[in-house]
């Protein structure tokens, strides 16, 4: 199998060299070139034809986000963004990046080595399998749907990974405040989930916030599991759904884990739940979605043609956990249809 050809775009000479050294230790990776700004990067792309590019958001002469917006329509390429704690990373995802990692402190060598081995390399390998659309999907106007089954104690649970930040937004923008409460696990580094929640809150008609223990799952409200070392569980207190955020070991390599959330929804909500699994590598959430379906819940999986990485939804589909398989653009409409039949 040929190694993955990687182009490293980073303006800091020290960090750039450390990245090259760390990535080159993996025999499945070949660093074919480096660039300190988007103009050098453009030339290197034409010269080396990399499989994956790592990209800093803050670059001289042109921002990484502007570069992505110019690059992707002309030369679609899987991009992993390396970013300090900033909501600009979501602009980069919107511009076409596949995934992102949080930039570590260069002064701490052990932390940097751990970052390259356990985070960046993993993201690069996943990105190399991603499906990159030559032209970004046209943003369609928000559709208006009606939820007619209000009064029932229903809950919606959503899980996603690679490509999920944009996929979740694509679904949420068509959700109205009349829908049952929504709980979400999106694999994301700590610190970024709060910014992502606030971004969605500004862009969508539903209320979105990073979840805290004791938050009630209310109609028209979306609770996003915080990134880090804690899982999100659905619980029932005095007949009302709440979330509990508590520490636990990684499940399927992730914390928070979609499986942990879905398993808790299966136990607590049973047939009063709708589970949705979106784009992502691996199988996190597949068994949990199956548990939900066995408990009487309805389930939706994103189809292969619209997934950045058809991993999690595929495993779920193969297990028999997916009742309806839908294109991303149709999931919001299907949500209303399913809820109105419950």
Image (cartoon, rainbow, N blue to C red):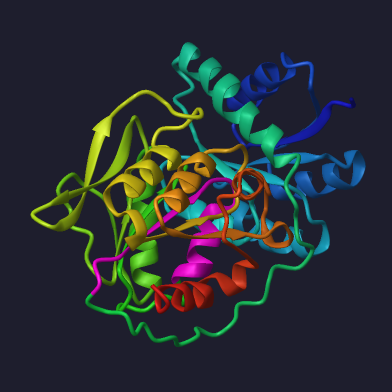
- Of the 4 image quadrants, the one containing the N terminus is top right
**How far from the left and from the top, in percent, is residue 74?**
82, 62
Q: Is residue 93 visible?
A: yes
Q: Compare residues 266 and 205 and report the one nearer the observer.
A: 266
**Residue pictured at 55% horizontal, 50% vertical:** 321
Quarter-of-image position of residue 329: bottom right
Quarter-of-image position of residue 84: top left
Q: Is residue 239 above or below residue 227?
A: below
Q: Is 295 in the magenta?
A: no
Q: Is 170 in the magenta?
A: yes
Q: Compare residues 81 and 274 and report the one nearer the observer.
A: 274
Answer left or right for 102 relative to 200.
right
Which span is picked out in magenta? 152-172
Q: Is residue 341 above or below residue 19?
A: below
**How far from the left and from the top, in percent, is residue 309?**
67, 48
**Residue pictured at 28% horizontal, 42% vertical:** 233
**How far from the left and from the top, in percent, is residue 46?**
89, 47
Furthest residue toward left: 238
Q: Compare residues 273 and 9 and report the one nearer the observer.
A: 273
**Residue pictured at 70% horizontal, 32% vertical:** 125
Q: Is residue 188 visible?
A: no
- Of the 4 image quadrants, the one containing the C terminus is bottom left
**How far from the left and from the top, in percent, is residue 42?**
80, 49
Q: Is residue 54 above or below residue 212?
A: above
**Residue pictured at 77% horizontal, 65% vertical:** 73
Answer left or right for 36 relative to 339.
right
Q: How many marks?
A: 0
């Amino acid at each position: 199998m040929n190694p993955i050809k990687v182009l490293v775009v980073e303006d800091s000479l020290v960090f750039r060299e450390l990245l090259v050294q760390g990535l080159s230790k993996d025999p499945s990776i070949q660093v074919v070139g480096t660039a300190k700004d988007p103009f050098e990067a453009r030339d290197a792309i034409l010269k080396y034809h990399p499989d994956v590019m790592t990209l800093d958001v803050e670059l001289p002469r042109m921002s990484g986000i502007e570069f992505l917006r110019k690059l992707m329509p002309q030369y679609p390429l899987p991009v992993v963004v390396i970013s300090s704690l900033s909501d600009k990373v979501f602009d980069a995802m919107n511009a076409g990046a596949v995934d992102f990692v949080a930039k570590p402190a260069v002064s701490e060598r052990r932390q940097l080595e751990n970052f390259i081995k356990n985070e960046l390399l993993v993201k690069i390998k996943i990105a190399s399998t991603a499906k990159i659309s030559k032209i970004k999907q046209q943003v369609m106007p928000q559709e208006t749907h009606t939820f007619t089954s209000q009064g029932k104690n229903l809950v919606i649970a959503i899980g996603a990974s690679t490509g999920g930040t944009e996929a979740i937004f694509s679904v949420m923008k068509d959700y109205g405040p009349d829908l049952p409460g929504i709980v979400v696990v999106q694999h994301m580094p700590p610190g970024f989930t709060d910014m992502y929640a606030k971004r969605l809150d500004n862009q969508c008609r539903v209320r979105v916030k990073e979840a805290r223990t004791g938050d009630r799952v209310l109609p028209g409200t979306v609770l996003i599991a915080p990134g880090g070392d804690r899982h999100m569980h659905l619980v029932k207190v005095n007949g009302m759904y709440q979330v509990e955020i508590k520490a636990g070991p990684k499940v399927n390599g992730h914390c928070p884990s979609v499986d942990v959330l879905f398993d808790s929804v299966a136990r607590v909500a049973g047939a009063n739940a709708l589970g949705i699994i979106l784009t992502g590598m691996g199988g996190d959430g597949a068994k949990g979605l199956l548990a939900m379906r066995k408990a009487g819940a309805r389930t939706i999986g994103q189809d292969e043609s619209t997934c950045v990485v058809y991993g999690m939804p595929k495993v779920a589909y193969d297990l028999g956990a997916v009742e309806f398989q839908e294109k991303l653009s149709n999931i919001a409409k299907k949500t209303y249809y399913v809820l109105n039949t419950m």
